[in-house]
Image (cartoon, grey):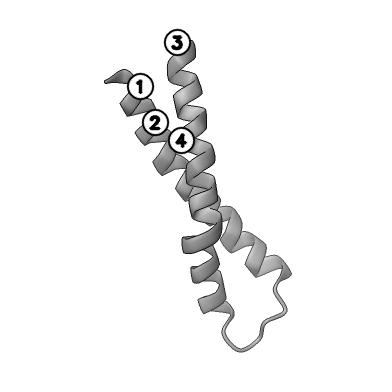
Amino acid sequence: MRTAAFCLAGLVAGYVVGAGIGAAGIELFSTNTHDKSLEMVMTSAFVTGPIGAVIGLVAGWLKARKG
């Protein structure tokens, strides 16, 4: 149960952090002038958020195994 809790916490936190980093990256580096907000939402929700979630899941699993 402890491992599942750590994995779930890492998954959620990783998604939020990944989506935030993706949104910030689009805001800073995108040259799109027509639909920048749509690009930001789609990239955060479907690319950087899931990547962050996987990284968070692995980090949570490793943390649960250590302690």
> In this figure, which residue is indicated by the disc labeled 2?
7
Q: Are marks 1 and 2 in contact (CB under 8 Å)?
A: yes
In the displayed structure image, the side of residue 35 where residue 6 appears, left or right: left
Q: Secondary structure at mark 3?
A: loop
Disc 3 marks which residue?
67
- Tags 4 and 2 in contact by the CB under 8 Å rule? yes
> Few, some or many C-alpha atoms within 10 Å of disc 4 (few <14, some 14-19, many ≥20)?
many
Q: Looking at the image, which residue is at 50% across and 54% down?
A: 49
Q: On the picture, is 43 further left or further right than 3?
A: right
**Residue 13 coordinates in the image, percent (x, y):** 44, 41
Q: Quadrant of residue 29?
A: bottom right
Residue at mark 4 to residue at mark 2: CA–CA distance: 5 Å
Per the model, the C-alpha gap separating discs 1 and 3 is 10 Å
x, y percentage for residue 52?
53, 46
Q: Are marks 3 and 2 in contact (CB under 8 Å)?
A: no
Q: Return the mark for residue 57.
A: 4
Residue where numbered disc 1 is placed: 3
Q: CA distance from mark 3 to mark 4?
A: 16 Å
Q: What whole-number distance in Å separates the C-alpha atoms at marks 1 and 2?
A: 6 Å
- Amino acid type of the residue that numbered disc 1 sits on in the rendered structure: Thr
Going by the picture, which residue comes out furthest to the left?
1
Which residue is the extreme one toward the bottom?
34
Q: State which tag comes first along the sequence, 4 or 2.
A: 2
User: Identity of the amino acid at label 3?
Assistant: Gly
